[in-house]
């Protein structure tokens, strides 16, 4: 290959051009193959059919996406809030940590699919969105809790001495030392948790299975039952686009808060 | 000279320190630190010099003996108002805070009136020659510059005593010489008391008015030596005969102590 440097114009364009080109080529091959082998559309619809479904069912699919978005973001934000608060409480009070930690682990390791029916019965079908939110929260909150606890305990020993030397109050030690030290860990947890919230919301809706749930997961099940495979693909596509947006949002948050100082966000030229 | 001037600033009497694992870090340490001195605690690793320094700072209590501040007032809780600046072996800066915020930390933690903080921080940064770097982050600075930030932070409250725990040990020799000179220049101007822990014979002779030589297992004082050379000291002193003689004296003191130590 001609040498244009590691960050030459070719390298810069190729970052977007290569995956985009590969995607277009793949879609073209797909379209062609479906027509060439006469694949029935309830097995594998052509990309053009999926696009059509996306347009025709657009408004109703958007409504479902909005429902899934609300559940996912609600679960994600409550996971962030409760995960961080509980992590802070655990750090302030070791007895509390020892008492509650096993139950937090228990909630984490029990598969959400297994708890879902119970939660749905407790909350009631008329408030199914709340049941879904609780289930997605259950999945999403643990990484934040465990990362917060580890992060708060990992402040630099020398800095701890310095804070002691200047007689820092507990609050100031938390505000100026422990919390900033924990932030990279917490944000790592937040990134994992964002993806898990979406998975939790989708899985919970699969289990809930019917009726008042109108999110994208239910549309996928419904489309499958009606053999409307183009719409199933359209819903899938929307889910993955939403997942990507969520992923980049959390990545951006991490960058915004850490790029001035943390090694993980610093580009080095060696 | 009035009586209060002859009282030591800090008096360590009969200090013994045993760690929780049973190691006797220090045995029978007596030391008077007089106001305005530049005193070096010199010794091999494990001789308790850093432990002694940390106890002076109030980070850890002696197992036996006492540390008094005869010329300081005591606060309501009975603690001496020590007004200490401490410089650790590592720069110990908060990576998430700017140079300015790092140097301002003692104010932040002490709830002092906020009025002149900015001026004081800028003054301290100017003292160490980093006034243009107030907005930088620690990772953008070299090792020597980080150490300067650490010194500015220790000086920002205008302490009476500056405690330094092998502050330049991790730096290259050229940077260390430069920081030695800059530290001495500051000290000559402001004349705080310095207790400087080091394992470098040359550094201790170059900097100090007095050297306390320590040995390990158990940590104890094996000798003491005044360095009568006048300040300012520079390359002339570093290459002079009296400097070499002092270095030899100190080295011999260390050697004698090491010979008696079966573990070395």
Image (spheres, rainbow, N blue to C red):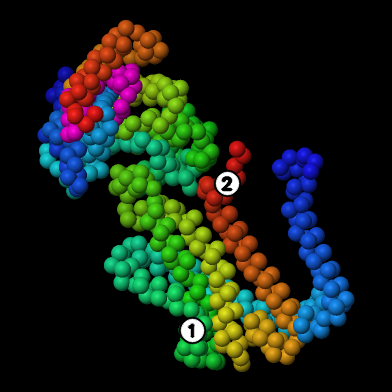
Disc 1, SS: helix
Q: Of callouts 2 and 1, which one flags the residue occurring earlier in the amino acid sequence? A: 1
Q: Provide the chain ID for the residue under circle 1.
A: A
Outermost residue on the front side: it is A37
Asked if residue B199 is among those painted magenta in the image, a careful observer would answer yes
Q: Are labels 2 and 1 assigned to the same chain?
A: yes
Asked if B157 appears above or below A181 in the picture, the reply is above
Mark yes or no: residue A101 visible. yes
Q: Which mark is residue B180?
A: none
Q: Which residue is mark 2?
A: A266
Q: Badge 2: few (under 14), some or many (20 or more) residues near its Cα, within 10 Å? A: few
Q: Which residue is mark 1?
A: A114
Asked if A247 appears above or below B52 in the picture, the reply is below
Q: For the point 50% across and 88% down, which residue is it?
A: A117
Point out residue A130 in the picture as x, y percentages from the top left corner.
Answer: 53, 83
Tell which tag, 2 or 1, sits nearer the viewer.
1
Q: B23 or B119, which lies in front?
A: B23
Asked if residue A249 is among those painted magenta in the image, a careful observer would answer no
Q: Badge 1: few (under 14), some or many (20 or more) residues near its Cα, within 10 Å? A: few
Q: Provide the chain ID for the residue under circle 2.
A: A
């Amino acid at each position: 290959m001609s040498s244009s440097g590691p960050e030459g114009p070719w390298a810069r364009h190729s970052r977007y051009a290569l995956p985009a080109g590969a995607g277009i080529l793949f879609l073209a091959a797909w379209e062609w193959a479906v027509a060439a082998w006469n694949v029935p559309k309830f097995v594998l619809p052509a990309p053009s059919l999926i696009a059509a479904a996306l347009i025709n069912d657009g408004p109703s699919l958007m409504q479902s996406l909005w429902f899934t978005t609300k559940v996912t973001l609600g679960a994600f934000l409550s996971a962030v809030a409760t995960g961080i608060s509980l992590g802070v409480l655990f750090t302030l009070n070791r007895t509390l940590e020892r008492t509650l930690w096993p139950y937090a682990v228990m909630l984490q390791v029990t598969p959400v699919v297994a708890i879902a029916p119970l939660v749905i019965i407790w909350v009631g079908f008329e408030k199914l969105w709340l049941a879904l939110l609780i289930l997605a929260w259950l999945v999403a909150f643990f990484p934040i809790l465990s990362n917060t606890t580890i992060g708060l305990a990992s402040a630099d020993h020398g800095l701890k001495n310095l804070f002691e030397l200047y007689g820092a109050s507990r609050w100031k030690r938390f505000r100026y030392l422990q919390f900033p030290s924990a932030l990279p860990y917490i944000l790592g947890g937040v990134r994992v948790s964002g993806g898990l919230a979406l998975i939790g919301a989708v899985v919970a809706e699969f289990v809930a299975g019917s009726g008042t749930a109108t999110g994208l997961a239910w549309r996928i099940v419904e489309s499958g039952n009606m053999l409307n495979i183009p719409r199933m693909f359209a819903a899938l596509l929307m889910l993955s686009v939403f997942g990507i947006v969520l992923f980049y949002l959390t990545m951006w948050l991490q960058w915004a808060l850490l790029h001035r100082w943390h090694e993980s966000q610093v580009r080095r030229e060696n | 000279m009035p009586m209060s001037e002859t009282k030591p600033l800090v008096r360590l009497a009969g200090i013994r320190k045993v760690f929780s694992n049973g190691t006797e870090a220090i045995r029978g340490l007596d030391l008077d630190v007089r106001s305005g001195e530049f005193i070096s605690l010199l010794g091999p690793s494990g001789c308790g010099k850093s432990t002694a320094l940390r106890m002076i700072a109030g980070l850890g209590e002696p197992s036996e003996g006492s540390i008094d501040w005869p010329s300081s007032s005591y606060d309501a809780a009975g603690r001496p108002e020590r007004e200490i600046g401490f410089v650790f072996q590592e720069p110990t800066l908060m990576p998430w805070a700017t140079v300015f915020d790092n140097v301002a930390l003692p104010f932040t933690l002490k709830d002092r009136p906020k009025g002149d903080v900015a001026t004081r921080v800028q003054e301290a940064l100017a003292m160490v020659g980093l006034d243009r770097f107030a907005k930088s982050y620690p990772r953008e600075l070299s090792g020597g510059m980080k150490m300067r930030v650490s010194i500015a932070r220790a000086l920002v409250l205008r302490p009476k005593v500056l405690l330094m725990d092998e502050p330049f040990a991790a730096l290259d020799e050229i940077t260390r010489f430069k920081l030695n000179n800059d530290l001495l220049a500051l000290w000559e101007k402001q004349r705080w008391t310095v207790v400087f822990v080091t394992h470098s014979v040359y550094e201790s002779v170059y900097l100090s008015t007095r050297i306390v030589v320590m040995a390990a297992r158990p940590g104890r004082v094996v000798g003491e030596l005044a360095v009568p050379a006048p300040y300012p000291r520079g390359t002339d002193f570093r290459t002079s005969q009296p400097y070499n003689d002092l270095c030899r004296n100190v080295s011999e003191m260390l050697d004698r102590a090491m010979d008696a130590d079966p573990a070395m």
